[in-house]
Image (spheres, rainbow, N blue to C red):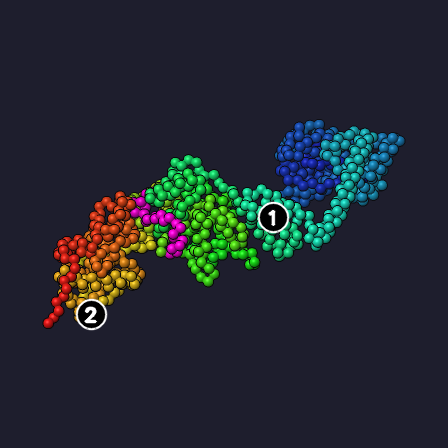
Amino acid sequence: MKLDYSEEKIEIKTRLPVLPLRDVVIFPHMIYPLLVGRQFTISALQEAMIRDKQIFLCAQKSPEIDMPGGKDLYQVGVVARILQIVKLPNGTIKVLVEGLIRAQIKTMSKSGGFYTARLQIIRPDTAEDRETVALSRSVLEQFADYVRLNRRIPEEVLFSFSSIDDYHRLADTMAAHLLVKMSTKQELLETDSVKNQLVNLSDILREEIEILKLEQKIDGSVRESMSKNQREFYLQQQMKAIKEELGQSDDTTNEIEQLFDKLKKLDITKEAREKTKEEIEKLSKMHPYSAEAAVVRGYIDWVLALPWGMKTKDRGNFKEVKSILDGDHYGLEKPKKRILEHLAVLRLAKQVKGPILCLVGPPGVGKTSLGRSIARALNRKFVRMSLGGIHDEAEIRGHRRTYIGSMPGRIIQSIKKAGAANPVFLLDEVDKIGKDFRGDPAAALLEVLDPEQNKTFSDNYLELDFDLSGVLFVTTANSMAGIPPALLDRMEIIRLPGYLEHEKIKIVRHYLLPKLRKELGMERIACEFTDDALLEIIRFYTRESGVREIERQLASILRKVAQQIAEGKRQSKVTFTPRKVANMLGAPQYLSTDIKLNPEPGYAIGLAWTESGGDVLPIEVTLMKGESKLTLTGKLGTVMQESAMAGLSYLRSHAEIFKLDPDFYKDREIHIHVPEGAVPKDGPSAGITIVVALLSALSGWPMRPRLAMTGEITLTGDVLPIGGLNEKLLAAKRSGITDVIIPFKNKKDLPDLPKELREGMNLIPVKKIREVIHEAFEGRFDTRKTTASPRKKKK
């Protein structure tokens, strides 16, 4: 078929490649760019270019379908010719097509990877009558109104319509420019006559114009509303600025009302209520941005934020309280029993009475965690305050409000943090409080820790009485020596001794290893330690009463195991022996003090207490000719030097009893040395050991094997009691000593010693130094004479 098209005759083919389109409908006389990316459409284009550049364009019913079939395509489309093809770098093709004439698919087949259709050409209706002319003019006017209302269509489009004298082409051009749904455009394309097409266009344009007019109306209303709102906002901001300058802001008024409401809800004392009410009224009369207002507001916020009368309910099941304490800590039976007694009294009396608990023990034995367990057992809030290094009294009581940046003391701050008036309050390291020109924090703590006074505790900042009687105070210390006497008088001491080796092994197995496996992500890895391996770590890689260093060493081993497993160098199951532990941790960090279990003359074994536990203390004595002199070496403290002098004086005054030359000290230098000279040593408990070492050197008799001793000596030969017996006996047992001489007055401490510690040890209580010498030298000296015979004067 030949088509007269713009002064040229085009032969229209009735069998053409098919190019399905998505979201677009092409009309005759329409030039449109297309992006072609699907392989079968590219093949159709290539086929069309080989022939005469004609192709059939039809729209898909659903744009989501990538491989449409015959049922997925509209049957009416446009025969178009290809004007230009450009291949893009991403593989797609940009093609410019021009619609020629309508056509309908009669049959369609697929070959060569694309669709080919046999077409029936739809000839344009060229009938013209007055109705068609009237319709075209009416539709053209409607289209002009549509373009003016629609901002997305340029008005220049209207100029092109004046040169179109073909009504069919006019209708197609207007239809092509409509911004309507694809299905609506397809209906216009399928309309058979120009008159029907113009009628349909008129209906569509009428509806679109109504919609556009409504949009304009809504847009105008919104704009007017926005202008009005902006004007009101501007005026409101001006009013707000004026009120702020006058100090009459509505926000301030609302804020004052909120503060009064909060005050009404508090269960507060009458004095505190009146004081706070005065401060709020004062704030209401101040400029909100003045410096003084900020100070007053800060004070009010602190008062209102405190938990006045707010108390948590204690746990009702006392057996559950006991099980929590037992589950959190292994051993420590005596301190746990005392804590349970205190908690039982607390539950029955419903208030804290009596002294404050003070947990005393070396580092790492669980003092702080025991305080946390008490809070968990009682179902109370827990707060902790470290007193180590505090020098300023204001840290406890706070600063007065006259100071810039003043705030309450840490007691009140911690109560606010707890959010309850009856927390468990742990005062950590109470023995390390400082003191200087700024005041004595320990003196400020006297009121806090006195049950008779802390009911009306007054902070310098608040200047109000706050009731601390509901607070369960627990303090911790490493030594009682650093605690001021007045403060110590208000506390009940609960000693936490160091752990024995068998206790440490159980703690490692039941607490530390499960915890470390969870932290290091090794729960599924079978990692076992033999008892000998754990003893290797305890004896040669740690020196402590607690378990902190053990935990660090175990963590180091597990991290190395995790690295080896990650690198594929080790199987998932690991069993550690002492040898493997040494390979992991390297050379031993600590070596036990070298002692001679079979002593030679001038050698005795004492026992010492240290902050990390107990240790053996060998003492060596040697005699030399020379000036009568006593030399002491080994970095001995004053008390220990005086013990050596007292011991020497005792032997001089009782020389005849021990068959010594009364003038043994003349023309002879006596040298007493305590090994490990770089380590400071002090205390009176080595007195009897020094006497035994001196007597052994002077007599030439060694003391009995595997014997150690501890006790203070007097000039009259009495043996006085000592401290740290648990730790000293632990050191003795670890060193292979089987017999230990202890002061008789320490016999009262024996029932409190662990059964495992006493097993295999012979403890010998003594009252006098002669008993010590009798036991040490196995009766070689006649100690029945208790005093020295008076010396005869030379004639």
Identify which residue is drawn at 30% across, 54% down: 609
* CA–CA distance in space, label 2 to label 1: 82 Å
Q: What element carries label 1?
A: helix
Task: Please provide percent x and percent y for residue 305.
Answer: 55, 47
Stretch in magenta:
482-509
From the image, which quarter does the N terminus lie in? top right
549 or 107: nearer the viewer: 549
Can residue 46 be seen? no
Which of the numbered marks, if any, corresponds to residue 277?
1
Note whether 183 is above or below 717 in the view shown. above
Task: Please provide percent x and percent y for residue 752.
Answer: 29, 45
Indicate the amino acid at tag 2. Ser
Task: Please provide percent x and percent y for residue 295.
Answer: 59, 54
Is residue 502 a member of the stretch shown in magenta?
Answer: yes
Residue 122 falls left or right of residue 625: right
Note whether 196 is above or below 499 in the view shown. above
Q: Residue beneath label 2, please?
A: 628
272 or 728: nearer the viewer: 272
